[in-house]
Image (cartoon, rainbow, N blue to C red):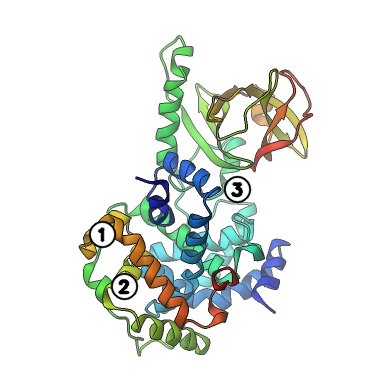
Amino acid sequence: MTDIELYERVRKKDKQALETLYDRYERILYAFVMQLTKDRDLAEEAMQEVFIKLWRGGGVYDESKGKFKSWLFTMSRHVTIDLIRKRKPDLQLDESYAEAIPSPSPSVETEVEWQEERAQIETAMAELPVEQQKVVRLMYFQGLSQQKIADACDIPLGTVKGRIRLALKQLRKHLSHDDIDKEVER
Amino acid sequence: MNACDQLIDYFNQHLTEDERIRFEAHLATCQTCQEELEQLEALVGGVAFLSEPTEPPSGMKARILDNVFAEDTTEPKLVKAEPAPVTPFTETRKKQKSSWGALALAAALVLSLVGNGYLLMNQDEPTAITLTDTVPLEGESEGVAYLAEQDGDRQLIVQTNGLAPLEANEVYQVWLLKDESPIPTGAFVTDDKGNGTVIYTLDSTESATDWDTVAVTKEPERGNQTPEGDIVLSASL
């Protein structure tokens, strides 16, 4: 069953469908919210908020919003940043983290379908100049303000958006069509 | 700063509630920002896979699903929601949509209420207003509905931004609905930016009712007991 079919069933209060969606996304979503929060309790709280939202129908997905996966991750990211701001308003920028190139941790078994996705984005990232990689990480994982991104990269405020735009354009070029929304491909 | 320059801060949730409302109004009319936001969002699903794999804690699935499915009867255990008094209205908190920036909203509300001379209207010593729920309104423009308590009275406060201008006798009318049956809860007219505010104090019967929807319609005249106009803003409670 596709994600969208599952989502439609969740909308009709099908518990089994929510559980299937949960199983499908638990690991990658948890890894993602951990990356944002760096705090297991907060990450679990964020996960719960995400699935409560799905269950209650807060934040509605439709196909005009692009791929379900992108919508789910965007919504999850929003929920998580919201929680971080409430619980840890002074979460500091971790420069070393922003610079780090992640490598799969051998102790954790990565699901097969992720490996492909991961390899794809890693390859795409590796093609970017280092300063663009950095801006992408600061932007997506640190959720920094434009000013803080400018400070961290030591570039003028007005340059941040252009650099992000450039990085996204490069990434899109390297990602498979399946991985990005039709709207973007146009 | 040009409105388009706030896109990153909007995406990363750094705008105040006020700035956000204004930016969303801009976004609605700016195709460049719409496209850039789409692109930012579309790649979230890709970059997420850069996350360091992390084993989920044991038992998390059961905890989360239990809490999710229990939401119709109890407050989710893990969500450390601010304690609220047990009243019919606070039950709506459970159905509350994500209202990030609640603090900013509260601050904006207090400022705005002071601005509207609300505290002055209470001739006695002004007492604290406690917000019990904050619900973003959706529809033709931006708005927020607040449920509040002051001196034991329950109040519905609606603030709007960017509503279309009114004709001569027209008003914007706020309604509370239960099972699609509305009661009028105050009318307002807007300023030149479509901003409007209405504060309505519920009586004891109204306070005890578990309202499911708040809506704003444009009415041809003040004082309608049932809506004639179309809904311009609404939200589930």
Left or right: B189, with A108 as reference point: right
Q: Mark 3 falls on what kind of element?
A: helix
Vertical order, B48 against B212 (above or below): below
Badge 3 amino acid? Lys
* Residue B31 image position (x, y, % from top left): 53, 55
Left or right: B42, with B215 as reference point: left
Q: Nearer the viewer, residue B34 or A146?
A: B34
| Chain for disc number 1 | A
Q: Mark 1 falls on what kind of element?
A: helix
* Residue B166 image position (x, y, % from top left): 65, 25
* Residue drawn at (62%, 72%) of the image: A19
Q: Are marks 3 and 1 in contact (CB under 8 Å)?
A: no
Residue A150 badge: 1
* Residue B94 image position (x, y, % from top left): 58, 48
Badge 2 amino acid? Gln
Vertical order, A171 against B165 (above or below): below
Vertical order, A54 against B194 (above or below): below
Q: CA distance from mark 3 to mark 1?
A: 39 Å
The residue to which callout 2 is attached is: A132
* Residue drawn at (58%, 68%) of the image: A183
How packed mark 2 is, by other alpha carbons closer than 10 Å (few <14, some 14-19, many 20 or more), is many
Single out the mark in the foreground, 3 or 2: 2
Asked if labels 3 and 1 share a chain, the reply is no
How packed mark 1 is, by other alpha carbons closer than 10 Å (few <14, some 14-19, many 20 or more), is some
Residue B204 badge: none
The residue to which callout 3 is attached is: B95
Vertical order, A75 against A98 (above or below): above
Q: CA distance from mark 3 to mark 2?
A: 41 Å
Badge 1 amino acid? Ala
* Residue drawn at (76%, 21%) of the image: B224
